[in-house]
Amino acid sequence: MSVVDLSYINLMDLGTSIKISGILLEGDGDTFMALLPDHDIQDNLTTMTLSHEDWKSIIRQLDFKETEVLAEVDGDIKKIIIRKCTRQIKNTVVWNVYRRDMYTCRYCGRNDVPLTVDHLVLWEKGGPNIEENLVTSCKRCNNKRGNMPYAEWITSPYYKEISMYLHNASKAANIYLITEIDKIPKRFHKRKR
């Protein structure tokens, strides 16, 4: 098996589906790949050995709300269901943000790809689902930013590269938002069960 550095992989570049080809069986020093019917292993297939942190990174990039994973727990194989917390944003708020940003990603300037909204103050850090805290972002830029603080994102090498084609006024508007972040009210988000 080869180990792959996931920091250089963006799952959105690989497509939007996951294909399970088989099950890896290990025990008594032997490792076997049990292929599912009608699945061939390609010569150019890269096998990844993933740590717990790598799996968390992959799951964060997926759009699935629920993911089933078989994992070893105390020597036994258990099925673990990982659920992402859903962030319910009113449709009227989302569409107002899209209109305000002219249906264009604020980071790369593209308007020919699926759009999402990105929180300036991260949702996990108490950022509310209000127009002042949201900008239009394509999925790729939103995933690339991840949980990076906005000021750090705007100065990151990736943002500098993708924003090359933005008008100077758009770049200035994005930088200006750094000064507005402290004015955004923070909210505590409770987990629902």
Image (cartoon, helix red, strand yellow):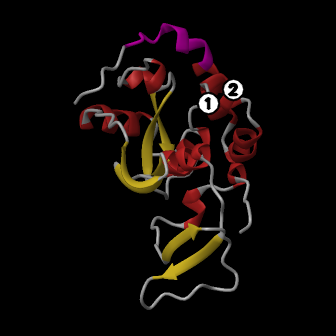
| Residue 185 in the figure: left or right of residue 96 | right
Q: Residues within 10 Å of mark 1 (few under 14, many from 20)?
A: some
For the residues bearing labels 1 and 2, Cβ distance under 8 angstroms: yes
Q: Magenta stretch: residue 150 in it?
A: no
According to the image, label 2 marks what residue? Answer: 152
Instruction: Name the element at disc 1.
Output: loop
Residue 60: image location, x then y, percent: 50, 45
Dominant secondary structure, magenta: helix
Write down the region rendered in magenta: 178-187
Which residue occupies 60% across, 26% down?
Answer: 150
Quarter of the image where one finds residue 188? top left
Q: Is residue 77 above or below residue 29?
A: above
Residue 19: image location, x then y, percent: 46, 73
Q: Magenta stretch: residue 185 in it?
A: yes
Mark 1 vs mark 2, CA separation in Å: 7 Å
| Residue 94 in the figure: left or right of residue 163 | left
Instruction: Name the element at disc 2.
Output: helix
Which residue occupies 32% across, 37% down?
Answer: 86
Residue 148: numbered disc: 1
| Residue 175 in the figure: left or right of residue 133 | right
* The C terminus sits in image quarter: top left
Specify the amino acid type for callout 2.
Glu
Specify the amino acid type for callout 1.
Met
- List the single residue furthest toward the bottom: 38
Q: Is residue 117 above or below residue 76?
A: above
- List the single residue furthest toward the front: 28
Marks counted in the figure total 2
